Image (cartoon, rainbow, N blue to C red):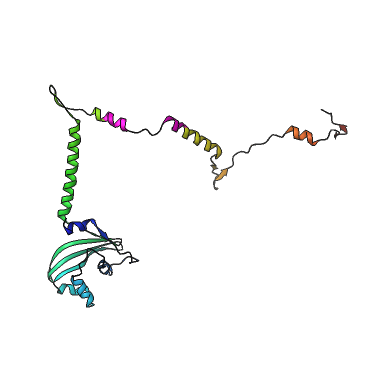
Amino acid sequence: MDDKVKQLDISWHDPTWNPLPNKDQILDYFSGRSNPFYDRTCNNETIRMQRLSLAHLENMVGLEYILLHEQQPILYVIRKQRRHSPKQVTTIADYYVIAGVAYQAPDLASMCNSRLMTMFHHLDSAFTQALSYSRYHPAKGYTWNFNEHNEEKKKKTPDAGSMFQINRVDTLLASLTQRFPHTHVQQQDGGKPTPIEPAKKVEKPNISKVSKSFPSNAVHDGKPLPEK
């Protein structure tokens, strides 16, 4: 496979840059030593060693990288081109940097090839599926039968759960609802909503305990209580 095609499947970023580079730093960021998209024989390396500005690239001949488009702070488009004269250049490749990650932009031939391969794949799948529906009979000729495939799909569809599982889930939900009842909220006019506390159960007094608390010779209103 060609190296140009291989570069369409890779990406590059430099984790040592924090924060992300701006438009004045993006070419320095792109010239990282580990970047497979960057050619170190370019004119950018020459003017960097001589500490010259990027404006001197127009007066040089050879390979160079320029900032073609920017959409700060996240998107930058860098073009690799070969300069023949101050006004004549030949584009070789375009690269885009999104959030610090560099990719090679696909050329028109690669993009058309990918779209055509995708189209042919779907057409082949459609013809293969249509062929599976056709039936041939010596007397009737070719016919279409879609019922068998629909029945097979229905049989292959798994059930969501058995009746035992469904009933078991309903039982668990009802048990949890009883243990942890919902807290209802009452909205007051012009005020904040206040929760309604559930009614508390009133315990019935134990008569046997009450009778034991009185002695047998207790007097009520001057008269002794009748013994049981």
Coordinates of residue 143 in the picture (x, y in percent): 16, 27
82 sits to left or right of 171: left
Quadrant for the N terminus, please: bottom left
Q: Could you tell whether 162 is left or right of 29 in the image? A: right
Q: Residue at x 16, y 44 (%)?
A: 120
Image x and y of residue 152, in percent:
28, 30
User: Residue at point 16% right, 57% down?
Assistant: 2
Residue nearest the viewer, comparing 61 with 41: 41
Residue 52, visible in the rendered structure: no
Q: Is residue 214 above or below residue 6?
A: above
In reply to whether residue 156 is colored magenta, the answer given is yes
The picture quadrant where one finds residue 151 is: top left
Image: magenta residue range: 150-167
Q: Is residue 155 above or below residue 10?
A: above
Q: Position of residue 116 (x, y in %)?
A: 16, 47
Residue located farthest toward the right when viewing the structure as drawn: 222
- Does residue 117 appear anywhere in the picture? yes
- Comparing 3 with 47, the one in front is 3
Task: Describe residue 54's horizontal placement relative to residue 190 as left or right.
Answer: left
Closest to the observer, 186 or 37: 37
Return the residue found at the far front.
Answer: 1
Work out whether residue 121 or residue 98 is closer to the camera in this orientation and state it: 121
| Residue furthest out toward the bottom | 50
Q: Quadrant of the C terminus?
A: top right
Q: Splitting the image into 4 quarters, where does residue 139 fall?
A: top left
Residue 43 painted magenta: no
- Residue 57 position (above or below residue 103): below
Q: Residue shown at 17%/59% (left/top)?
A: 4
Q: Main secondary structure of the magenta part?
A: helix
Residue 50 point in image, percent of width and height: 22, 78
The part of the image, by quadrant, that contains residue 74 is bottom left
